[in-house]
Amino acid sequence: MRTGPDSVGPLPPAGVVSSPPEDRRPTTSSSTPWLVLLLWLVAGGMIGRSPLRADLWDDVRSRGVLRWGDDAEGGAPYLFHPEDDPTKLVGFEVDFAAALATRLEIRDQFVQNNWDMLLPALRQGGSFDIVIAGLERTPENLAKADLSRPYFVFAQQLVVRAADTGIRSLDDLRGRPVGVLSATASHRLLERRGTVEIRVYQDNVNYFRDLEVGRLDAVLTDTPIAQVNLAGNEKLRAAGPPFEPGYYAVAVPPGETNLLARIDQAILGLTTNGTLQQIYTRYGLWGAEQEGLRKWTAPAQVIRRQRSALREWKTYLPMLLRAAVTTVWVTCGGMTLAVIWGLALAIVKQYGPAPLRWSATAYIEVFRGTPLLLQIYFIYFGLAQQLGLKLSAGLAAVLALGLNYAATEAENYRAGLLAVPRGQMEAALALGMKRRVALRRVLLPQALRISLPSVTNDFIAMFKDSSIVSVIALVELTKEYQIRAIDTGDYLGLGLLTAGIYFAMSWTASLGARRLERFLQHDHR
Amino acid sequence: MITVEKLSKAYGDHRVLDAVDHRQERSESVVLIGPSGCGKSTFLRCLNQLETPDAGRVTIDDVTVDCARPVERELQRQLRLRAGMVFQQFHLFPHRTALENILEGPMHVLGRPRSEVEPEALDLLARVGLSDRAGHRPSQLSGGQQQRVAIARALAMKPRALLLDEPTSALDPELREEVRDVLRRLADEGMTMLLVTHDLQLARDVADRILFFHGGHIVESGTPDEVLDHPQHPRTQEFLGQ
């Protein structure tokens, strides 16, 4: 079916959104949140419903280019920048994509996309036509996209430190930290077993680093990743044989049966004519297990129902709340540090002797002027690598947030100190107070009251900023949302639950702050 | 009690104080008058080192400060402990009650226990007529009441002398009388006071001696009767004639 670009879907009639005339009184402010919510739901519905368009295969053929999405952070051997020429992109999936396109008599084009968001972006359509990203042919992934016949056979491989000779399988790792890539078959396998402490990572590189320095006791990953990272690394070894084999498949937007059929046909051709064997041999990945590609036949399709987080809130809300606990303690810890350290910085910058004053100024400028993400990486990975200072993810998160926000808090306090009239210091000195006593008894109590609204503001901002700590394998609320949303595909329902929790947290914080302000104000009158 | 020798201060090329000399006996109250910008407030603030003079010597009671050299903080503090200060804008601590404002110095500068200081503070509040305002914050008090608390706060430190910088200038005319009343009684009780003011009524009420300040100098000195009613110096005549 071919329809024009104007068929985005019917807009709701104006009457649905605007109130009838007799309701248009100034009192409508109470209904505003409902209007916003309604608009959001309508908009969400339109995005969720994939717009009707021309057959994707027609598009691809007339364009002459097959655009495939993947994440270059995925690393070797899938796709990576070789050390001798970082401008190039190589890997067995790069070669496979090229061979696939050639077989379809068109060219291929790589499109970079965050690994986590590959399938949602594919469903959304627009930037790429297919996904080639080591996607497992699992029921979870089949619920989100249509999958081709397999182009690679992989298995799970447990990796441990070479020195830990006692570990042979997951059974030896009860209650101990094991790293996995987010939303992979390995991740689900660990969740199903539930016997180890799962640490979720965004890429295939950092968990090996954390395993080497001792933050993890094992990594569970796919055989190709294990193979590449174990080669030439004497610190790590494979624990036990590979297990739980599975298939990598190409993902195609749901319903694009024509494109899927072409790709299936092409893969079968590459399998039987030996092209795949050539490619995989080049990367040292060919083994007897790949024979399974020839014999593969499509199993009976299990149609998985899209799950609704709102309907199943009893399952999802506790998961999100557990993650919210991490958000709360990381934020409270970080803010406590920021408030205390910031105060010290403000006092030193305002009243300290020259060298200390310069140091405080430099600190504030550096921490304000560089990204929080960079600071987290520096504290967590940088210190461990260069100084052997192995902070736990939780401590690193609290430190990074605290040290970063301290710079902002210091300036808040300084604004407060500068806002206290000069006469206050003079009156204190005239009474015979030493500067330190004057600061403590007269200036700071007044300055802190002035800074309180800004500090509250930052506290609430930190609740949201704390989501950035998920980059160091800490599953807080936003990360949990992301994991569950990728699993269920229910971005809207989970989003509402998650937003509700965030709102409850920041609302509680601002209520508390308002009470404190009123208390101090009372004090003032 | 107060001796000032050759006190000088300049802002750039502008000489605010030009080698000013001044002697004042115990229990004497001296009032400085003069046009705006003549240096009289600067003079007062130099006495307790809220401004740093360029040269000269200041003695209050047993403490002498030589202003030509950098002054040690502790010596500055000793000087300030002997001279209480009352400001035009009161400068009460807004986050503390009237009583707490008075307790602040004795407890947190002299380290005396509250049990000992509180009766004295309540007595001081009674002397300035504010016994019923002990628990009020400065923002709940009128200007005249705030200034009376500020005077009590300065007196709580038992200073040897009191420096007052235009204590009635920020007040509405009808509120000045209550502050004048307090200061009149202090003068009668023999408090050594050095007072800068534009309030000629106040000057007449409390001064044993009046100094007319002009261009960084004391150009005329005498009893209120002499200076206010029979000024000799043309500048004084011009000022009072306005």
Image (cartoon, rainbow, N blue to C red):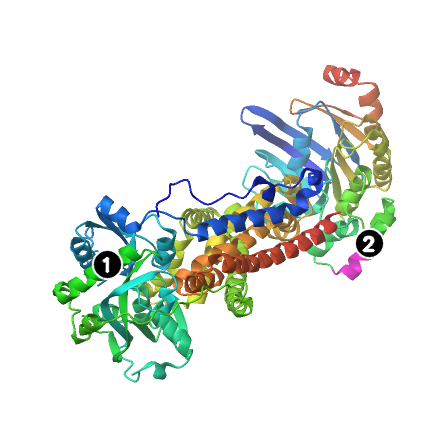
Q: Mark 2 to mark 1: distance in Å?
A: 96 Å
Residue tagged 2: B120
Does residue A177 sit above or below B222 in this rendering?
below
Type of amino acid at the residue the image marks with label 2? Glu
Question: From the viewer's perspective, is the residue at label 2 or at label 1 nearer?
Answer: 1
Is B42 a magenta residue?
no
- Estimate how packed mark 2 is, as few (under 14), some (14 to 19) or many (20 or more) residues with alpha carbons within 10 Å: some
Badge 2: chain ID:
B
Farthest-out residue, front: A1
Q: Are marks 2 and 1 in contact (CB under 8 Å)?
A: no
- What secondary structure predominates along the stretch shown in magenta? helix
User: Element at badge 1?
Assistant: helix
- Estimate how packed mark 1 is, as few (under 14), some (14 to 19) or many (20 or more) residues with alpha carbons within 10 Å: many
Q: Position of residue B143 (x, y in %)?
A: 79, 37
Does residue A54 sit above or below A305 in this rendering?
above
A340 on left or right of A296: right
Q: Position of residue A27 (x, y in %)?
A: 71, 42
Q: Which residues are magenta?
A: B113-119
Q: Is residue A73 visible?
A: yes
Badge 1: chain ID:
A
A127 on left or right of B202: left
**Observer-nearest of A347 and A124:** A124
Does residue A447 sit above or below A488 in this rendering?
above
Residue tagged 1: A263
User: Element at badge 2?
Assistant: helix
